[in-house]
Image: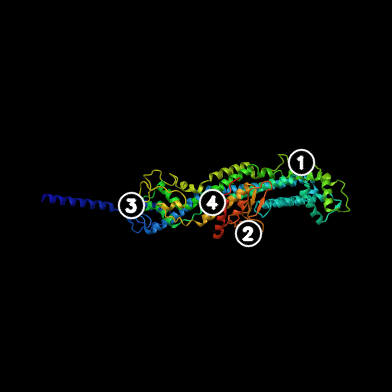
Amino acid sequence: MNAMWRLHAAVCMTLSLLSLSSAADSKARSCGEARHAYHARGFSLANVPHQEISGEHLRVCPQGHTCCTSEMEDKLNQESKVEFENLVEESSRHMRTTFFSRHKKFDEFFLELLDNSEKSLNSMFTRTYGKLYMQNAEVFQDLFTELKRYYTGGNVNLEEMLNDFWSRLLERMFQLLNSQYHFTDDYLECVSKYTDQLKPFGDVPRKLKAQVTRAFIAARTFVQGLMVGREVANRVAKVNVIPACVRALTKMLYCPYCRSMPGLKPCHNYCHNVMRGCLANQADLDAEWNLFIDAMLLVAERLEGPFNIEAVVEPVDIKISEAITTMKDNSMQVSAKVFQGCGQPKASGIGRSARGISDVFSARFRPYTPEERPTTAAGTSLDRLLIDIKEKLKESKRFWSNLPDDICAKGKFTESDEDQCWNSHTKGRYFPEVVKEGLTNQVNNPEVEVDITRPDTLIRQQIMALRVMTNKLKNAYNGNDIYFQDSSDEGSTSGSGSGCSSGCTTEYVFVGTEASVIGADRSDERAAAAAGKSCSVGPSLLLLMAALTLSLRAMQTQWR
């Protein structure tokens, strides 16, 4: 009997203790900290509980005792989406700004370099040849106009344009050196046909064509690359946040509010899984981005060395003057061969001037001294500019795959103490493993449910834009050209040089210009010919698939 009584007493005591424990647990905690943090976000405190309430209504955060209502959870959902967009925008701001500023600086430098060269030639030729130059100045002005048009994206074939310049110059000089004759347009056309055969300007046209063609191809492609890098980065930084990502972000960033722990930062590995899930498509851009950066660096090396645009453009006045002197020295032989091939022209009835034309061309050409020559373009030199750009390009490698690491940096966004952080449910250590970056690796992501069969269309378009640009850079590295033609068919494009603003729309139409001294492989041109848009939302799906198929084939071509 006593034993039964003792057993009854023990059971009653146990039930009593359990009842007391349950009552203690059920005592709601204050939501003061949560209310303060919620209000700091700019939200109204109306209908925000002062003490914890039952959380069965919550769809994202843990359903225990909570300080969040359904309305609060919805607002925090929206807030997490905006905060994530801002995080990616802010994390990529420096890199995007760098591409913008270096594109602008290189563009300014190149255009000012051309302007300075044109001014130098005009001043030197006016002093040396006087009225004769001024009467024929449009030949030289047209040369610089076409060079600028090429650089800014115009549909200009450099070789044909330079050949036309020398032909026009030959016609003008031939008339001046034989002013006692009258020449018809047909006769002058016959004269121009002898340009290659007679080489009246010596070896200058061949050398200058090779130098100008390679240097301008490299410079224009390089500035296009800076523009494409800027545009791709701007588009990719505007993330498409899927609903599963929003839920994961809310759970990581704001569910601590609901547990009255608003100051608790997420665990480092927890943050990694969330960010790698939300930025899976961006990480897939990384491989093509790195190839693009490598190609940009190689073209930069060309610009520093054999394709140095500064070394080509600055002395162009001296080179053209050398060609004119050669023509003058060989004028009698050239004229005799032309007369033999085109026939004896009729006398004009006008004798030569007291001072022979030959004497004018014999005037000593005096180039600028270093003190007289115009200041370096855009306040810098090509070497300094390229050193700076190369350094920034190297810093941007692996940017997209490293973006989750940058966002989840310990101490800045996450808690460095792995036992005192938010692990998606409460304060404590986060145990799941961190998944690898990239879309296919998210199949086992414990935090974000990602459909790995549906890649982001915008990201795929940017991958294609980078692939096309990389092929262009490879061709430029080898001295070959593939250039953009504006879809308006007006002969200029907004896709390169200084002719592109953030809202431009450019179709890829590829036409080859090859430097005669290079002979590089042109297989990448065929692959690049099916590309999408560089400055627009993107190509059609059909065009995208065609370009992808061809580009994959072209990627087998190795750097020379």
Q: Residues within 10 Å of mark 1 (few under 14, many from 20)?
A: few
Instruction: Using the numbered discs, state the Cα–Cα distance from disc 4 to disc 3 in whole angstroms.
Output: 45 Å
Q: Residues within 10 Å of mark 2 (few under 14, many from 20)?
A: some
Of marks 4 and 2, which one's residue comes earlier in the chain?
Answer: 4
> Residue 366 — which label?
1
Eye-nearest disc, 2 or 3? 2
Instruction: Using the numbered discs, state the Cα–Cα distance from disc 1 to disc 4 in whole angstroms.
Output: 48 Å
Q: Is residue 281 visible?
A: yes
Eye-nearest disc, 4 or 3? 4
Of marks 4 and 3, which one's residue comes earlier in the chain?
Answer: 3
Which residue, as the protein is rendered here, is positioned at the far top?
A: 370
Eye-nearest disc, 1 or 4? 4
Q: Position of residue 502 (x, y in %)?
A: 58, 55
Circles 2 and 3 in contact, beta carbons < 8 Å: no
Q: Secondary structure at mark 2?
A: loop
Of marks 1 and 3, which one's residue comes earlier in the chain?
Answer: 3
Quadrant position of residue 320: top right
| Residue labelled with disc 2 | 487
Q: Residue at x 59, y 54 (%)?
A: 527
Q: Residue flagged by tag 2: what amino acid is it?
A: Ser
> Residue 30 — which label?
3
Which residue, as the protein is rendered here, is positioned at the far left?
A: 1
Q: Position of residue 455 (x, y in %)?
A: 48, 56
